Image (tube, rainbow, N blue to C red):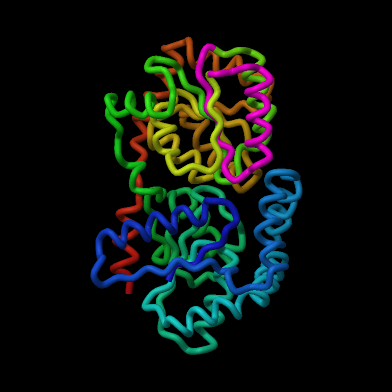
Amino acid sequence: MFFYLKTGGGHLAPAKAVAEKIRSKRKSNTEILLVDGLSESKSFVKKIIEDGYKNSVNKAVWTFEFLYAVHKITLVSKLTATLVSYFIKPGIEKYILQINPKKIVVFHFFLIKPVFEIIEKHNLDIPVITVVTDPFTAHPIWFLEKGQNYIVFSDLLREKCIERGIKGDNLKVFPFVLDNKFSRKIAETEKLKIRRNLGFEADSKIILIMGGGDGMPHGKRILKNLLIENMDAEIAIVCGKSNKLYNQSRKLKEKYGMENLKVYGFIDFIHSLINISDVVITKCGASTFMEVLMIGKVPVINNYIWEQEKGNMEFVCRNNMGILERDIRSLPGVLQRLLTDNEFYNSISTNIKNASIRNGVGQVSDYILNFQ
C-alpha cells in the first residue's frame, strides 16, 4: 500500500513510478494500491492541505516559506503533525484495516504519524518504509519518528538525518526516482519525428517553459518577456492544471502573432518535449529539475521555494549544470547566450553528462519488494 498526498507532483510522481516498475516485475503475485491519504477526509481538510499548498506556493510563496521556517521548531512540527493526524487518521485506518497490506510505503510526511499510530493501536505486524521525496532539503516533519526505515535520495540528506539522531542502519540511499521512461535516450531520428508531429521545425532551437503540474510561477511574465524580445527560437509553455496560465498564454500568442509559440495544458508527453528542447526554464521542484537533468538538457532556474527547494537549486548551481536567474527581465539575455554561444552551452551540457545522473526507480522497487 503506497500512501501519498496531492500536494504538488513531487510526492505522487515517485509513488507512481515505483508502483509501475514493481507491477512490471511482479505482475502475477504483487498488487500495489496507490492511496490518497486524504481520499476519506472531510472536504474542508482536503481544501486546507491541498489548496493551501497550491495557493501558497503559486500566489503567496512567502507564507509557505514562513511556515517551513517555523516548523524547524520541533514543538511546532509535533503540534502540526498531531493536528493533521487527528483529521486524516480515520480514513487511513479504514484502508489499512480493510486491506491488511503486507507492506506500507509512505510518500508524504503528514502520513507518517497516522500510519504508525494505527499500526501501534491495532498491534499490526506491517513493515513501513518512508520515502523522503525531497532529495537535499527535507521538511522537519519527515524526521519526528526516529525509528523509521527511510529511503533518501542523497548522501547529503543521509548525513543530515544522522545529525538528527537517526541511525545509519535505518537509512538507505538510492538515486532519485523518476518514471522509467526518463532512463531511455531518444534517438535523433525519433526526435525529428516528435518535432514534426508536434509542429516544430526540424532544425530550430526550442525553449521550453515548464514548472510542474500546477504550471510555472510567473509564467505569464516570463513568456511575455521572451515574446517581446522576439527570440530566434521556437517556444513551448506547459501550463499544467493552471487554466489561468493557459488562457493568458493563448492571449499573448494572439496579441504578438507568434506562430512559433506552442501552448500546452496538462500533458502526458513532457518526456518528449524535454528531449527535443535545448533549454528549459523551470522551477526547482525535485521531480521537475531531475527530469531535465536526466535527459541531459540545460535548466534555467527562475524560481525555487526557500528552503524546501533550496538544496535542489544549490545542487544544480554548485555543479555548474544549469543557471539560476530570478530576474525575469534578464532571462532573454541568458537564453540568448545559451543558444548562440556553443562553447558556453556545451560546457554546461558536459557537466550534466559527467554527473552521470541515474534513475533509481529499479533499485528502489527492488528494495521495497525484498524489504522484511
Q: Residue furthest bottom?
A: 122
Q: Is residue 297 above or below residue 114?
A: above
Q: Position of residue 178 (x, y in %)?
A: 40, 48
The answer to whether any part of residue 284 appears in the image is no
Who is closer to the viewer here, 10 or 311? 10
Q: How many marks?
A: 0
Q: Quadrant of the C terminus?
A: bottom left
Q: Is residue 1 above or below residue 97?
A: above
Displayed quadrant of residue 370: bottom left
Residue at 40% x, 76% y is 127
Q: Is residue 106 above or below residue 248?
A: below
Who is closer to the viewer here, 178 or 224? 224
Q: Position of residue 176 (x, y in %)?
A: 41, 48
Magenta-drawn stretch contains 242? yes
Residue at 27% x, 59% y is 24
Residue at 29% x, 29% y is 190
Give the extent of the magenta segment: 232-259
Displayed quadrant of residue 354: top left
Residue at 30% x, 54% y is 362
Relative side of 359 to 220, left or right: left
Q: Quadrant of the N terminus?
A: bottom left
Magenta-drawn stretch contains 319? no
Relative side of 359 to 54, left or right: left
Q: Position of residue 265 (x, y in %)?
A: 56, 39
The answer to whether any part of residue 8 appears in the image is yes
Q: Position of residue 109 (x, y in %)?
A: 57, 63
Q: Is residue 153 above or below residue 327?
A: below
